[in-house]
Amino acid sequence: MTPMGAVYLRVLEDLRDQIRGGLLAPGDRVPSRNAIIARYGVGETAAKHALQVLAAEGLIEARAGAGSYVRRLPAPAYLEHDRPHFPGSPFGLDSLAGDGDQAPSPRLSWEYQSDRVVPPGPVARRLGLTDRDQPVTRTRYLMSADGAPVQLATSYEPDLGGPPAADAAGRAVADRMRASGITVDQVVEEISVRPALSAEAAVLGLPAGAPVLVIDRAHQAGPRTVEVGEVVIAADRFRLRYRFPA
């Protein structure tokens, strides 16, 4: 007997390849659950699961009473990693066009809000807090281009004896630390992909569970981590571009 997981993966991979290869073009209707059952000789559970995963990956969208269709995705724009000293995110958006295209520079805007919270356990450990209930300053940033949301960022900072972080949230982390007599000498970033959380999807205008790029960033002063943050970006809309001197 073939395991259900293997059957479901066979359907999923074939439909995914058809979408990415252009056989199923943007706007085309995806085979219905009954059509998948008949075409692939699978059960209802495998057919349903394959469609659910394609929707979670942002490749298709369901329309009430009309079935599922391949999503129309804009050409991805490039987010340049050229602002390491910017407060909310190291990435800047120069244009809304893909590589090689010409487009007017978008009007960028930032919103941010700070509050005092008890940090999640992993954040508390990374910041080296001995008292896990010790509050820190959390600042949330939202960057928009021409009014459309581009990226979310969340930053956590402990009290370091200088001006309150909430009072200087519009300044770069290194500048805020310098006011506390602390010199940031290293920034560490880790990039991963995961499904968007419901709150992130709502703010970024994404389907629930759509893939997002997550940049986990930490500012360090010697061996001590003095700030940790997370930047969340829609994976199907943007590519991250890094430039290094040769």
Image (cartoon, rainbow, N blue to C red):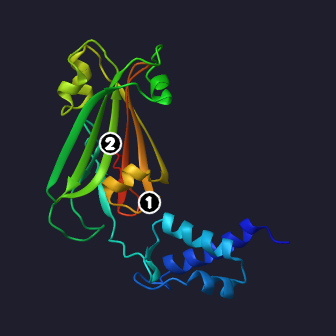
Marks 1 and 2, how far apart at CA: 19 Å
Question: Which residue is the site of mark 2?
Answer: 153
Please name whichever residue, 80 or 164, is drawn nearer the observer in this view of the structure. 164
Query: Mark 1–mark 2 contact, CB under 8 Å?
Result: no
Q: Secondary structure at mark 1?
A: loop
Q: Quadrant of residue 187?
A: top left
> Which quadrant is the N terminus positioned in?
bottom right
The answer to whether 105 is drawn above or below residue 65 in the figure is above
The answer to whether 217 is drawn above or below residue 185 in the figure is below
Q: Is residue 103 visible?
A: yes
The answer to whether 105 is drawn above or below residue 189 in the figure is below
In primary-sequence order, the first of circles 1 and 2 is 2
Q: Position of residue 138 (x, y in %)?
A: 32, 30
User: What residue do we see at 50% from left, 76% from top?
Assistant: 20
Q: Is residue 86 visible?
A: no
Q: Position of residue 126 (x, y in %)?
A: 47, 25
Q: Position of residue 170 (x, y in %)?
A: 18, 34
Is the residue marked by circle 1 packed among few (<14), some (14-19), or many (20+) residues within 10 Å? some
Q: Nearer the viewer's eye, disc 1 or disc 2? A: 1
Question: Which residue is the site of mark 1?
Answer: 208
Please name whichever residue, 6 or 49, is drawn nearer the observer in this view of the structure. 49
Amino acid at circle 1: Ala
- Tell me the tag on residue 155: none
User: What residue do we see at 15% from left, 61% from top?
Assistant: 105
Which residue is at the far right?
1
